[in-house]
Each structure stands twice: as structure tokens, then as C-alpha cells.
Image: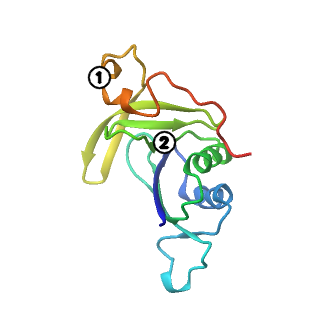
């Protein structure tokens, strides 16, 4: 079964994201706007990259990613190549909780205020997920995550 990845990038232009995605994934990346399903190479990944309002406004959707391609090292490689922070959803159902992937490969949970607009979700007011914050203490969804409050996974970037 193929995977679907949804990421956000801190201020990268789509034109620079596509070649970095191809290098990070080690595959041909076809922009969604020009991808013809009947003519796609078997090893290609279809991606859509666009700008949205708010912080981390560069949106990336990757369609048909092979299961054997691991997501965390892939986004870490993209963050390193672009020298930008990237976000991905974490394993909770909290719409405001994400994993922040730094260019050095460090991964940590963060929270945002989320406002739904006609143009999609707009993120603002980033803060670390930490037990020092009342919303992350006790029985919060944060403690049910593989990425507990105050957790930091260093250097998961692909070489």
C-alpha cells in the first residue's frame, strides 16, 4: 500500500522544494499539476507544493510514497537540504500538535494555535510541548504519544 505524507516548511519557495524533495526521497518527483497517472514511472512520487497563509506556510503533499520509504528520515533529509524547519503531524489526534524537524535532524513535539480558514488551517503561536505547560501535563493527549512532552530525538537525518 502507498503512503500519503503531509508536511509544512518554514518559508521555502515551491520552486526550491521540488528538487530538494527528489534528492531527499531518492526518487523522481512529479508535480501533481503535470503528473499523468498513465505515464508515471513506477519509482516516481507525485507531490504538490503550494503556499498557504501563516507560519510554516509552504505545504507539501506527497502521494503514492512506497511503504518501504521511511517518513522521518525523509523529512529530516528535506529539512537539512533546505536548511529550514519542517513540520509533520504527530501520532495524536490533536490538530495543533506537530513534530518539528530541524535542519540538524533533531525532532521534537511542538504545539500551535490552529485557525480554520477558507484557505485551510493557519498555524500561529508555536510553543514546545513540555510538562511546564498546563496543556501538556497529566492526562493530556501528549502523554499518549510516542513523542512525550519534552522529548527530543537528536540527529535522525539521513546521511
Going 44% across and 27% down the picture, which residue do you hit?
148
101 on left or right of 8: right
Color style of the picture: rainbow
Query: How packed is label 1: few (under 14 Cα within 10 Å), some, or many (20 or more)?
Result: few
Locate residue 30, reporting x and y percent.
Answer: 56, 71
133 on left or right of 159: left
Nearer to the camera, 35 or 14: 35
Q: Is residue 1 above or below residue 96?
A: below
Going 34% across and 36% down the picture, which residue do you hit?
96
Q: Is residue 46 above or below residue 60?
A: below
Q: Is residue 90 above or below residue 64?
A: above
Q: Which mark is residue 81?
A: none
Query: How packed is label 2: few (under 14 Cα within 10 Å), some, or many (20 or more)?
Result: many
Locate residue 71, reporting x and y percent.
Answer: 55, 51
Q: Residue under circle 2? A: 87
Q: For the residues carrying marks 2 and 1, which lies nearer the camera in this image? A: 1
Q: Who comes first in sequence, dot 2 or dot 1?
A: 2
Going 29% across and 23% down the picture, which residue do you hit?
139
Label 1 sits on a secondary structure element that is loop
Q: CA distance from mark 2 to mark 1?
A: 24 Å
Label 2 sits on a secondary structure element that is strand
Nearer to the camera, 3 or 15: 3
Residue 20 sits in which quadrant? bottom right
Locate residue 111, reporting x and y percent.
Answer: 39, 31
Q: Residue under circle 1? A: 139
Residue 95 sits in which quadrant? top left
Nearer to the camera, 65 or 128: 65
Amino acid at each position: 500500500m502507498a503512503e500519503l505524507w503531509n508536511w509544512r516548511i518554514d518559508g521555502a519557495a515551491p520552486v526550491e522544494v521540488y528538487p530538494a524533495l527528489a534528492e531527499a526521497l531518492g526518487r523522481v518527483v512529479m508535480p501533481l499539476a503535470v503528473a499523468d497517472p498513465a505515464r508515471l514511472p513506477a519509482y516516481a512520487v507525485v507531490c504538490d507544493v503550494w503556499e498557504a497563509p501563516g507560519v510554516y506556510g509552504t505545504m507539501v503533499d506527497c502521494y503514492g510514497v512506497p511503504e518501504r520509504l521511511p517518513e522521518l528520515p525523509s523529512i529530516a533529509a528535506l529539512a537539512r537540504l533546505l536548511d529550514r524547519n519542517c513540520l509533520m503531524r504527530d501520532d495524536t489526534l490533536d490538530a495543533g500538535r506537530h513534530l518539528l524537524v530541524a535542519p540538524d535532524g533533531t525532532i521534537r513535539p511542538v504545539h500551535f494555535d490552529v485557525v480554520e480558514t477558507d484557505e485551510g488551517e493557519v498555524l500561529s503561536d508555536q510553543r514546545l510541548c513540555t510538562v511546564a505547560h498546563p496543556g501538556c501535563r497529566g492526562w493530556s493527549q501528549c502523554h499518549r504519544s510516542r513523542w512525550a512532552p519534552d522529548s527530543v530525538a537528536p540527529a535522525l537525518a539521513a546521511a
